[in-house]
Image (cartoon, rainbow, N blue to C red):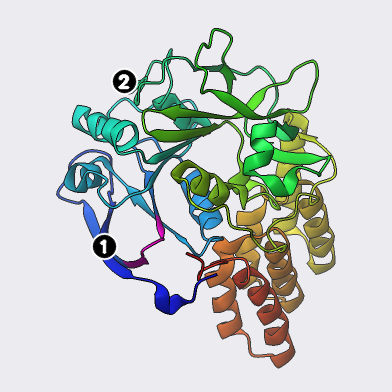
Amino acid sequence: MKKNNFLTLLTITLFLLVLSACTDSDKEKKHIKKRELSKETIAVGIYKTCNANPVNIRNIIEALRIDGGIVAVTLTDEDILRAELENIDVLVFPGLNNGEFNDTTNNKVIQIIQKFVVVRGKGTIGICSGIDMLTVNNECKTLSLIGIDSIKTINNKNNSGLYKFKLSDEGKNIFSELKNTENLYIDYQGGLIFDITDNSNPDLKIIAQKADEEDSIPLFLTSTIGKGKILLAVAHPESTPGMRWMFPRMVRWVIGHDLVAYDQNVMRPDYYKNEIVYSDEYKANYEKLINELKESKKENKLILFDKLQENYSWYAAETVRTFLKDKDSKIRIRAAKYLSDIEYTAAIEDIEKAIDRERNRKNREQLEIYLNVLEMMVEQNASIE
């Protein structure tokens, strides 16, 4: 490990443009963010198309915060046209809103992204329906965006759920910490699977697939595109407690940087014990529990928190987050514990505010414990080159 004083600091300007709508408008809000990056910092751009899923973007950003050597910004077409991805190392295509495709991408943007990967040798990651922008046989304008003509995605008739999966030898090289773990689970939201039946690309590799001999669905694929590398995932490590570290690892792999280790507080492959099917019954029971939580008294709320954390841990996180403002201190503290248990770092600022509002010393100390747990999950390995 090299000391920080050996770092050569470069100042680059990454433009974060937040649009109030997907079309040009006088009401557009522009925010310019200046980031000071070390020589070895990895700059990740998350392509914010018109149909991008904001929840998926938030989860990706929070997962990337685990790695202190990675910074992330969202990028619109206007950002890409302005700077042509000059200071970006890895481009991420997040999931789109349910049932939607992106059909508005500027042709010049497509050319910039093609050059980014094929000629400049940068990295690309596609997540869930965001993969549609990179593959063929889809109805969106941007099909075969960076020249992949050997992969396609098809609708999946299976239920979504928490899938048990297994790694190939190539996958074990990327996620070496998991090579001796027998039971691995990951969030799969359904809708798409890879169809590589007719594939003839020798660089295409399945690195993870559903652990089911009868229906072994590929979950992660990798390939080389020109000088660059690409990783495609129909599953969601960024929303799987204990596995979120896989996302910054994916970023490091596609750009060819050292695959640094993360701490055990985020590297928890044994967090889940069994598969969960997101069936209609499962979802209906979730709604029932949420409604009860909003109406119940304190004792029942504490019991409901336990049920939600056991069966709907990430599903219920945003609802649980609101209980940091509950009038009862036991509920506020239990909400903070829930969020820290599932690595919900998006709630760090909310817990800080809860601490500021808290007048009872013992309650403050308890909240500070859970805040510290979450803070220890971000910016790991910040001094590693």
Q: Is residue 26 left or right of residue 178?
A: left
Distance (Cα) linking label 1 and label 2: 32 Å
Callout 1 environment at 10 Å: few (<14), some (14 to 19), or many (20+)? some
The label nearer to you, 1 versus 2, is 1
Q: Quadrant of residue 261?
A: bottom right
Please say if 254 is above or below 197.
below
Q: Is residue 256 magenta?
A: no
Q: Is residue 191 visible?
A: no
Q: Which of the two discs, 1 and 2, labels the residue nearer the N terminus?
A: 1
- Residue sitting nearer the eye, 381 or 227: 227
Do residues under tags 1 and 2 come within 8 Å of each other at their CB atoms?
Answer: no
Q: Position of residue 56 (x, y in %)?
A: 51, 44
Q: Which residues are magenta?
A: 36-42
Q: Position of residue 88 (x, y in %)?
A: 33, 49
| Image quarter of the N terminus | bottom right
Task: Label 2, secondary structure: give it.
Answer: loop
Q: Is residue 231 left or right of residue 38?
A: right
Q: Residue at x 39, y 72 (%)?
A: 7
- Residue sitting nearer the eye, 89 or 74: 89
Amino acid carrying mark 2 in the image: Lys
Q: Which mark is residue 243?
A: none
Q: Is residue 38 magenta?
A: yes
Q: Residue at x 51, y 23 (%)?
A: 203
- Residue sitting nearer the eye, 199 or 237: 199
Q: Residue at x 70, y 79 (%)?
A: 369
| Residue placed under numbered mark 2 in the picture | 141
Task: Label 1, secondary structure: give it.
Answer: strand
Please say if 142 is above or below 272.
above
Q: Position of residue 146 (x, y in %)?
A: 35, 26
Q: Which mark is residue 12?
A: 1
